[in-house]
Image (cartoon, grey):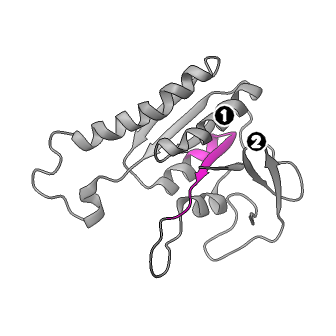
């Protein structure tokens, strides 16, 4: 893993000062050869959730938050199906079924972990915007960002940049990557 100064590398840039601190269940990226300091020591541990496979990242976030006496903010981002084609079809998801499915996914992922860590406040939210942009913006007030890394689905051609890649380059606090 290569990581530069959080929030300082622009598109196409790569900082040269790197370090990585291995955590029990993942990697925490820092800078200048030091153990990463919290972005905002009293801020929440921000955990980005895509699906149920990210429960390990949420557990890692809760363990870290418990040690530091911090809350956890779990964020699930998603794009409505119609947003992927650039226009809204008449009558598309008028019943809100897609939103309900994402709310259920968030509960299925967060509720068991909340029970495992009763002393940690876990606040969960779902938003319909870009995952990378949301996490980067919320990292401004976070002590730590926790992301899950999954093996990409096989495909032909070039692979687009992932939210993990964007967050590593633009986050405003340390980032932990947990295998998913």
- Please tell me how crowded label 2 is: few (under 14), some (14-19), or many (20+) other residues with Cα within 10 Å: some
* Sequence-first tag of 1 and 2: 2
Residue under label 1: 43
Classify mark 1: helix, strand or loop.
loop
Is residue 177 found inside the magenta-colored segment of the image? no
Q: Is residue 113 above or below residue 3?
A: above
Q: What percent of the width, then of the height, locates residue 58?
A: 59, 37
Q: Residue at x 61, y 40 (%)?
A: 56
The furthest residue to the bottom? 157
Classify mark 2: helix, strand or loop.
loop
Q: What percent of the width, then of the height, locates residue 106?
A: 43, 36
- The quadrant of the image that shows the N terminus is bottom right
Q: Is residue 134 above or below residue 124?
A: below
The furthest residue to the front? 154
Q: Residue at x 65, y 59 (%)?
A: 168
Residue 125 lies left or right of residue 6; in this view the side is left
The furthest residue to the right? 33
> Cβ–Cβ below 8 Å for labels 1 and 2?
yes
Residue under label 2: 38
């Amino acid at each position: 893993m290569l990581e530069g100064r959080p929030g300082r590398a622009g598109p196409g840039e790569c900082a040269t000062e790197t370090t990585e601190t291995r955590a029990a269940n993942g990697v925490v990226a820092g800078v200048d050869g030091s153990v990463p300091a919290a972005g905002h020591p009293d801020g929440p541990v921000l955990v980005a959730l895509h699906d149920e496979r990210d429960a390990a990242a949420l557990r890692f976030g809760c363990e870290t938050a418990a040690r530091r006496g911090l809350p956890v903010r779990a964020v699930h981002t998603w794009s409505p199906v119609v947003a992927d084609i650039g226009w809204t079809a008449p009558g598309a998801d008028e019943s809100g079924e897609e939103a309900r499915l994402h709310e259920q996914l968030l509960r299925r992922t967060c509720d068991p972990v909340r029970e495992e860590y009763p002393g940690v406040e876990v606040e969960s939210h779902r938003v319909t915007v870009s995952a990378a942009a949301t996490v980067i913006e919320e990292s401004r007030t976070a002590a730590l960002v926790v992301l899950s890394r999954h093996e990409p689905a096989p495909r032909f051609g070039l692979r687009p940049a992932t939210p993990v890649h964007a967050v590593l380059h633009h986050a405003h606090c340390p980032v932990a990557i947990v295998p998913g």
